[in-house]
Image (spheres, grey):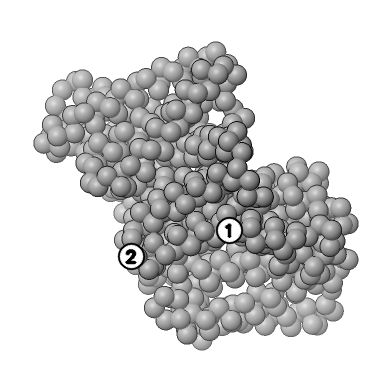
């Protein structure tokens, strides 16, 4: 959704918000170009800049405005105080020296938790609050789940004035990487890149059998690669593809299911992959370019499974391609594709040819994308439309940066408690004991935990929490770190299409005016790859080794692609009973054969 829609009517307030958005964007880009800024300066200022967007922007109602203003003022004052006194606080080594500092610490924790509640609802803030209660009072719990106690001033200091807790490594990712790529996505979305994606997809797949659905798959894969949000993907590409499918006579449940499944793949599709991929960089110590390489083949398999599922549905329904009149002219395809090809080329050349860091290369790509905001799809310059596109990019970037930052700050509290109290190690032991030391039992428990958490919190938060407690157990049972993290990351996406809480399905069903349960069943059949590909990463570990062992990776890719195709036709197609059973057995054999040998 455009940030312009929530601007107040007052011209002065509109300009004030646009100016504040410019400050936020300039601050984060400036950090990349300016060199080393102390962590206890950049990270608190990051919090100070995002708070007004969480507490005040687009807010209606007198009480929410007053409380939001008070909380913003308290949080900004506390964060700026930490940044201003960074040198002094660094000498305290995480110990609060007086009551004023204790008050600042409690104020920061309270503001961070409330910011997350207003950004995404209750579940994640409740987990953070329970974690803090455990830290303060867990020494009263008998047995192995109690702890020996943590001194208040040391614990609170570690959480709020040292480079741990809310100023820890997760926040570093939010400040230095996630924010930059979110800004990059906002700049592309404000221009003609989205239309470019649609035109390329329509030109490539529009004339095929089931072409309207396949346009949805391709456009969602392309758009999702910069949005990283299933909901945003459904709302944007679905506004075009859903009417096109229903107009051609596609069943509504199929049209909505295709859009929900295709849109859910954005967070696993390089190069951006959503905020979770950048968090993975920090948690695993793996370079981002290597994570991109590891994630590419699984992401392609996901969209391949959806594509094959559409072909299987074409054996049951007459799924027409797009009419020639609805397909874009080649000139429009070429021109509009430049709006994403130029920034993407700058990004890739920066990372792979020039050897820049991903965030530095992204800053260069942002500048390229910003220049393209000067013209529209007809290559015409209109100063009013250009100003509107720039304002939209600034406002959208600020809102998205702030929402993700609110999640990461709150998740950092949970991670800080797990580390300081030893609770993470204890939960890992419980997982190992509950699974009897069996890898597949641990994988099942982890998948269920991801599904349950993902129902109530965003994918990034679900991934961070699950991998913090289950990741060590999976690695002790023999998984490589990146293998374990990608497994958890994928299963954190399950809730986008899996009932009872399936956000992408709800949105697509509403847009198509169809019963959401019917849409969910269709989406789960089309999105079978979301459930099976993470398991394929375990049975075919070479799948994620494309950068280091391309031959073995492509062999694994081919086997899994054939297995997914067989299972899709077994579930969806009109094959006879014996053939259906044979296809199912073939698919299962290809997917899990190496684990049974």
Seen as rendered, the residue at the extreme left is 91
Q: Position of residue 537 (x, y in %)?
A: 50, 72
Q: Which residue is mark 1?
A: 338
Measured from the top left, where is residue 363 in percent x and y? 40, 50
Front residue of 215/266: it is 215
Q: Residue at x 75, y 42 (%)?
A: 510
CB-based contact (under 8 Å), mark 2 and mark 1: no
169 up-or-down from 58: above or below:
below
Residue at (53%, 71%) from the top-left corner?
297
Number of other residues with Cα within 10 Å of mark 2, as a class: few under 14, some 14 to 19, many 20 or more: few
Instruction: Name the foreground residue: 238 vs 349.
Output: 349
Residue 504 visible to an observer of this rendering: no
Asked which quadrant contains residue 84, the reply is top left
The answer to whether any part of residue 576 appears in the image is yes
x and y, in percent, of residue 23 in the image: 39, 32
Q: Which residue is mark 2?
A: 355
**What is the CA distance from the residue labelled 2 to the residue labelled 1?**
23 Å
Classify 51 as above or below 174.
above
């Amino acid at each position: 959704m455009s940030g312009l829609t929530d601007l107040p009517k007052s011209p002065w307030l509109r300009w004030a918000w646009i100016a504040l958005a410019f400050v936020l964007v300039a601050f984060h880009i400036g950090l990349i170009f300016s060199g080393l800024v102390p962590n206890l300066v950049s990270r608190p200022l990051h919090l100070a800049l995002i708070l007004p967007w969480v507490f005040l922007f687009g807010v209606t109602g007198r009480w929410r405005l007053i409380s939001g203003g008070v909380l913003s003022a308290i949080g900004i004052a506390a964060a700026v105080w930490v940044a201003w006194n960074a040198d002094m606080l660094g000498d305290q080594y995480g110990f609060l020296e007086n009551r004023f500092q204790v008050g600042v610490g409690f104020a920061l924790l309270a503001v961070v938790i409330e910011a997350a509640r207003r950004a995404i609802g209750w579940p994640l803030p409740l987990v953070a609050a329970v974690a803090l209660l455990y830290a303060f009072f867990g020494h009263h719990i008998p047995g192995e789940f109690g702890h020996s106690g943590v001194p208040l001033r040391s614990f609170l200091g570690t959480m709020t004035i040292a480079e741990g807790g809310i100023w820890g490594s997760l926040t570093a990712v939010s400040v230095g990487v996630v924010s930059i790529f979110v800004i990059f996505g906002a700049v592309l979305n404000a221009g003609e890149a989205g239309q470019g994606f649609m035109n390329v997809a329509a030109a490539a797949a529009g004339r095929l059998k089931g072409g309207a659905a396949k346009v949805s798959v391709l456009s969602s894969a392309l758009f999702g690669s910069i949005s990283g949000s299933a909901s945003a993907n459904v709302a944007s590409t679905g506004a075009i593809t859903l009417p096109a499918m229903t107009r051609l006579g596609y069943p509504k449940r199929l049209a909505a299911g295709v859009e929900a499944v295709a849109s859910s793949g954005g967070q696993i599709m390089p190069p951006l992959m959503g905020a979770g991929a950048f968090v993975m960089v920090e948690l695993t110590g793996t370079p981002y370019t290597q994570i991109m390489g590891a994630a590419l083949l699984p992401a392609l398999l996901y969209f391949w499974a959806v594509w094959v599922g559409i072909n299987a549905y074409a054996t049951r329904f007459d799924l027409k391609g797009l009419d020639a009149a609805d397909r874009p002219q080649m000139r429009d395809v070429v021109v509009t594709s430049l709006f994403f090809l130029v920034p993407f080329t700058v990004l890739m050349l920066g990372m792979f040819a020039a050897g820049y860091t991903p965030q530095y290369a992204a800053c260069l790509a942002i500048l390229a994308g910003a220049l393209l905001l000067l013209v529209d799809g007809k290559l015409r310059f209109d100063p009013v439309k250009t100003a509107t596109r720039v304002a939209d990019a600034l406002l959208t970037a600020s809102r998205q940066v702030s929402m993700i930052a609110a999640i990461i700050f709150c998740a950092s509290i949970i991670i800080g408690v797990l580390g300081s109290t030893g609770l993470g190690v204890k939960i890992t032991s419980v997982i190992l004991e509950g699974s009897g030391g069996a890898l597949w039992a641990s994988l099942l428990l982890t998948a269920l935990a991801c599904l349950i958490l993902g129902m109530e919190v965003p994918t990034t938060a679900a991934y961070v929490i699950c991998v913090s407690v289950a990741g060590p157990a999976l690695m002790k049972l023999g998984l490589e770190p990146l293998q374990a993290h990608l497994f958890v990351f994928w299963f954190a996406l399950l809730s986008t299409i899996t009932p009872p809480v399936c956000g992408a399905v709800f949105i697509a069903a509403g847009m198509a005016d169809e019963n959401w349960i019917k849409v969910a069943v269709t989406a789960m059949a089309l999105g079978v790859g979301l459930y099976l590909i993470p398991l394929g990463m375990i049975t075919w570990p070479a799948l994620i080794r494309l950068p280091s062992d391309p031959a073995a990776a492509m062999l694994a890719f081919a086997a899994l692609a054939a297995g997914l195709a067989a299972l899709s036709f077994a579930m969806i197609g009109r094959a006879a009973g014996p053939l259906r059973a044979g296809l199912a057995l073939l698919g299962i054999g290809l997917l899990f054969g190496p684990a049974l040998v």
